Amino acid sequence: METEENTVAITATPNGPFIVEGNFKLIDREGKAEVRKGRIALCRCGRSYKQPFCDGTHRKIHYNDLSLK
Ligand code: FES
């Protein structure tokens, strides 16, 4: 059953990261899982130095998500 409490929202921000909100499991590339609750920003431009998280680099490189279409 879907409730506000167990729903994860993923929002693509204009020319920026994916905002993930809710209760979720973050699994790194080695397969290590970490249960999270709250809000995180995941890099969408691929240039963050803190992958998988956004570090603001998208602003410096003028990332434009419309140029990917
Ligand atoms: S989306 Fe922010 S650094 Fe990539």
Image (spheres, rainbow, N blue to C red):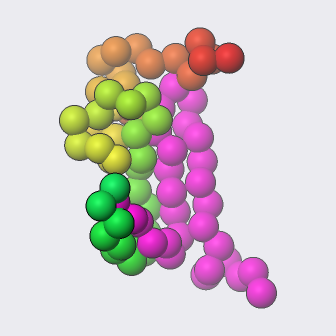
Q: In terms of image quarters, where does ligand 1 lie? A: top left
The magenta span reads 1-28
Q: Residue furthest front?
A: 30
Q: Which of 57/32 is in front?
A: 32
Q: Residue furthest left?
A: 49
Instruction: Give x and y (percent) for residue 1.
Output: 77, 87
Q: Quadrant of the C terminus?
A: top right
Q: Quadrant of residue 35?
A: bottom left
Q: Quadrant of residue 4?
A: bottom right
Instruction: Give x and y (percent) for residue 52.
Output: 34, 47
Instruction: Give x and y (percent) for residue 36.
Output: 39, 73
Going 59% across and 54% down the picture, which residue do you hit? 10
Going 41% across and 49% down the picture, which residue do you hit? 41
Q: Which of 35/59 is in front?
A: 35
In the rendered view, would you say 16 is above or below 25?
above
In the rendered view, would you say 69 is above or below 11?
above
Going 50% across and 50% down the picture, which residue do you hit? 19
Instruction: Give x and y (percent) for residue 30.
Output: 30, 61
In the rendered view, would you say 45 is above or below 34?
above
Going 33% across and 47% down the picture, which residue do you hit? 53
Q: Residue furthest right?
A: 1
Q: Residue furthest bottom?
A: 1
Position of residue 54 in the picture relative to residue 9 (left or right): left
Q: How many marks?
A: 0
Magenta stretch holds residue 54: no
Position of residue 56 in the picture relative to residue 18 (left or right): left
